Image: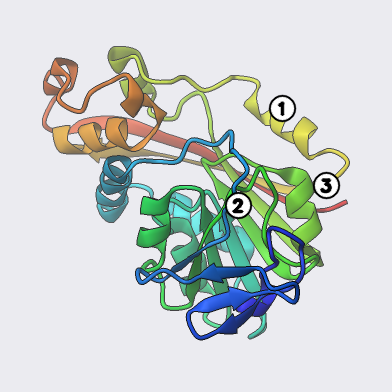
Amino acid sequence: MAGLLACPECALGLEPHARVLRCGHGHSFDIAKQGYVSLLTGASTKMTGDTAAMLDARAAFQGGGHFAPIAAAVAEAVGSDAHASDTVLEVGAGTGYYLAGALDAAPSTLGIALDVAKPAARRCARAHPRAASVLADAWSGLPVRDGTLRAVLSVFAPRNPAEVARVLAENGRFVVATPTERHLAELVGPLGMVTVDPDKDRRLDTAMSGHFVAVDRVLVEYPMKLTKGDVANVVGMGPSAHHVGTEDSRIAAFADATEVTASVVVSSYRPA
């Protein structure tokens, strides 16, 4: 799988040498003892990675199966008719949950989990036996060779359409999952959580234009029964964690089993 990666300094291909990846110009990148490779350069990034606490909350919530229908829809959008050499990349992989679901549905496929946060890279190194973990900044450029990937996933994560278009194969697919206004609506108001832009779908298509053509859009919407602990994890796993504490008294006011809506659009695009 290392052969798909490109040097972030000069874009030449990387090759493994013991516990190092090295390009033809001599740039080398250590493989950490936790199992991930850092392809971050010295350039500053505008991305803010998730903290270890946020990832712990997300893993706990995902482990409860609450987002399993979303993971299934993402995996279906990727498809299972893969060849042994096919590779799927998840950008902003976090825990690697959605990538692992896609790989489980396609037994011949390999995966790359990419995230800008070290805690995420460490966790993703254990996410799936067929997935490699890469620490990198997607906004600075994906450290992947041109036209080599079968699919790229972006689930509740920032996107770099130009770079995704570059690394996808001609018949590749870009799968994007975004929340609707109804997603977690029963929590957003009472807890003052970050709201969803009602114009999100139009802005997504605008960002994709010139690089991608939309081929499918599926609404995944269903009720979830959440405990107070689940609610605390929802708060703690996303951007709302920065201004709503998981010990907030408003969480304690919820019922022991609160019905909360999950509402996500899974959009599929092909290169233009």
Q: Amino acid at mark 3?
A: Val
User: At which x and y percent is residue 104?
Assistant: 46, 73
Q: Quadrant of the N terminus?
A: bottom right
What residue is pinned by disc 1?
A: 203
What number is the disc on residue 41? 2
- Who comes first in sequence, dot 3 or dot 1? 1
What residue is pinned by disc 3?
A: 213
Residue 237 figure quarter: top left
- Who comes first in sequence, dot 2 or dot 1? 2
Decide: few, some or many residues near mark 3? Use Cα within 10 Å; few <14, some 14-19, many ≥20: some
Alpha carbon distance from label 2 to label 1 = 30 Å
Q: Secondary structure at mark 3?
A: strand
Q: Decide if residue 176 is in sight here.
A: yes
What number is the disc on residue 117? none
Mark 2 and mark 3 in contact (Cβ < 8 Å)? no
Q: Amino acid at mark 1?
A: Arg
Q: Decide if residue 81 is in sight here.
A: no
Q: Amino acid at mark 2?
A: Thr
**Residue beneath the point at 62% across and 46% down:** 176
Decide: few, some or many residues near mark 1? Use Cα within 10 Å; few <14, some 14-19, many ≥20: few
User: At which x and y percent is residue 44?
Assistant: 59, 38
Drawn side of residue 119 relative to residue 211, left or right? left
User: At which x and y percent is residue 88?
Assistant: 61, 67
**Residue beneath the point at 62% across and 58% down:** 77
- Who comes first in sequence, dot 3 or dot 2? 2
Residue 159 figure quarter: top right
Alpha carbon distance from label 3 to label 1 = 14 Å
Q: Secondary structure at mark 1?
A: helix
Q: How many marks?
A: 3
Mark 1 and mark 3 in contact (Cβ < 8 Å)? no
User: At which x and y percent is residue 255?
Assistant: 13, 25
Q: Is residue 212 above or below residue 235?
A: below
